[in-house]
Amino acid sequence: MTAPALEVFDFLKNQHEHLLVDVRSPIEYQKGHIIGAVNIPLFENDERSIIGTLYKHQGKEKAVEKGFEFVNPKKSDFIKQVKQFTDQKKIQVYCFRGGMRSNSFAWFLNSNGFDAVVLKGGYKAFRNYALNYFTLPKKIILLGGKTGCMKTLFLSLLEKNGYHTLDIEQLANHKGSAFGSINEMSQEPQQIFENKLFSQLVSKSNSDYLIIEDESQTLGYNKIPHALWLQMKKAPIIKIDMPTELRLQHLVNEYSTTNKEHLIKGITKISQQLGPLATKNCINYVEEGNFHHAAELCLSYYDRTYDYKYDKKKNEHGFKELYMHSSDLNENYFLLKKIIDQTILLWKSN
């Protein structure tokens, strides 16, 4: 029972036009899947475990027999599930290695009037392809600067105005700091984060450049793939700075409506760097609702960290500093846009 198979590149090329079906067990799908795929498992988690045990102790034939025993009662339901997701006939199917699970599912669909193809090499081949994609050279401009400089806001404005950006914090559901999970959805497994990042990069593959916020490699539980991270480390940086009071006001606006316990949890994460007295005072300020003074104490730590980081980069090629004196968002955006346009123009002229 074999179905037509496509290499990864051809399989992904049309994935947004056809229904993409992941037939692996739910636990495999939850750990990581191709973005946009729906899960119609050939075997449930416990069934897959039973088949694996049989294969190990009694051989392939017994495992296949048990597999058919599990699948046969579900066949009509498979058709119903596919039809619930799409009224199209073209279906793309994958399992882990492009073996029996995806082939038998696709063959069954084709026997019932569908036009199903499988991914050659399965999800494993996709992962190898995605991880290798991060190694491909990219022209990157980094937006850097101290905490509270509204880097994420400027990144969003640039995207809305037609610039090519990549919001890694949004993909990770984390802002990267000890307070990074606040006001964010729960983080997803590393493979899903990487697959989302890959999907975004592919969607912007025709871009001449990418504007990305200067990040630590680790954002909560997620980690930027090393190959991409190395390229980011070598990229030109536009370091944004603005008066401390403006940064404090931005942080207060962002976090003052947050659950106080979440803020206190973030403070305890940097307690060693703040010191016992500052940590105690900072927690007291939060409990009193004095978010301005709490943010001020936290900035004393974060500013030292950023100063140390950027002092080492000042003499590097492509490092630019942009001081925003004004609280006028449009004025600041225009200043940033001007520097980015100059950087892009320089690249194109070379």
Image (cartoon, rainbow, N blue to C red):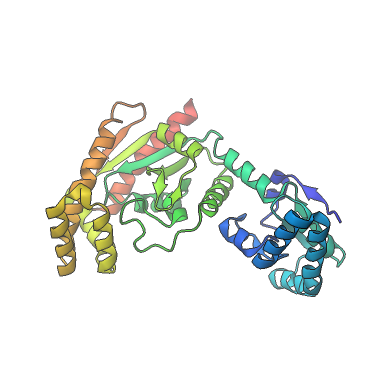
State the image quarter where residue 304 is shown.
top left
7 on left or right of 199: right
Give the percent coordinates (x, y) of residue 185. Answer: 43, 63
Give the percent coordinates (x, y) of residue 190. Answer: 50, 52
Identify which residue, 339 or 96, lies in the foreground. 96
Give the percent coordinates (x, y) of residue 121. Answer: 73, 46
Identify which residue, 140 or 303, lies in the foreground. 303
Identify which residue, 246 or 37, lies in the foreground. 37
Image quadrant containing the N terminus: bottom right
Give the percent coordinates (x, y) of residue 155. Answer: 39, 49
113 on left or right of 235: right
Which residue is depicted at the point 81% across and 71% down? 72
Can residue 167 be seen at all in this image of the molecule? no
Residue 345 vertical placement versus 7 (above, below): above
Residue 73 vertical placement versus 300 (above, below): below
Can residue 230 be seen at all in this image of the molecule? yes
Which residue is depicted at the point 33% across and 45% down? 334
102 on left or right of 143: right
